[in-house]
Amino acid sequence: MRQFLLLAFTLILIPSSHAAELATVKDAWVRLPPPGANIAAAYLTLETKQPLTLSGAQSPAAETVELHSMTMKNGIMEMRYLPALALEAGKPVKLEPGGLHLMLINLKQPLKAGEQVQLVLDFKRGTRAAGTVHVHAIVKAAN
């Protein structure tokens, strides 16, 4: 029985420790939205050691979190929803103002400078779920 419990405990821990190694997240921050706004943009840098796909995100601070891209087309800035983002092993991907970013939609309460927002990033390897990474992003005004 003791060996069974040890095996069960080990199997529970493996996905958790493996999920933390899925991706390295750096410089996570959320742009302080203007007063009364119910959306905010989150930025960060992702790097993985293996090919993965960022397949979604959630946050307790918002009803929905979507991945978007921004591009300039004929002098007009266009924002597009992206269902997923492919990540190559060893190649950092920056989510930054004017480019890729996460949109926090329908904020549950106003954000304040200096507070932290939790983000949960979902990853897939091929068509299978690979795990999640929890991120704490600081709210700050854009430079």
Image: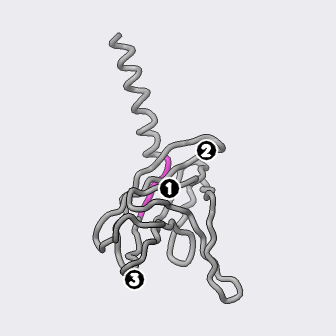
Q: Residues within 10 Å of mark 1 (few under 14, many from 20)?
A: many
The circle drawn on residue 57 is 1
Please give the residue where the numbered disc 2 appears in the rendered image: 125
Residue 20, quarter of picture:
top left
Q: Earlier in the sequence, mark 1 or mark 2?
A: 1
Q: Is residue 88 left or right of residue 37?
A: right
Residue 71 position, x and y percent, is 63, 78
Location of residue 114 with respect to 75 vertically, above or below? above
Please give the residue where the numbered disc 3 appears in the rendered image: 143
> Of 80 and 135, which appears nearest the observer?
80
Residue lying farthest bottom?
75
Residue 140 position, x and y percent, is 35, 75
Residues marked 3 and 1 touching at CB (< 8 Å) = no
Identified by mark 3, the residue type is Asn
For the N terminus, the quadrant is top left
Q: Is residue 29 left or right of residue 101?
A: left
Q: Over which residues does the magenta segment extend? A: 22-26
Q: Residues within 10 Å of mark 2 (few under 14, many from 20)?
A: some
**Residue 71 lies in the magenta-colored region:** no
Of marks 1 and 2, the one in the foreground:
1
> Of 121 and 95, which appears nearest the observer?
121
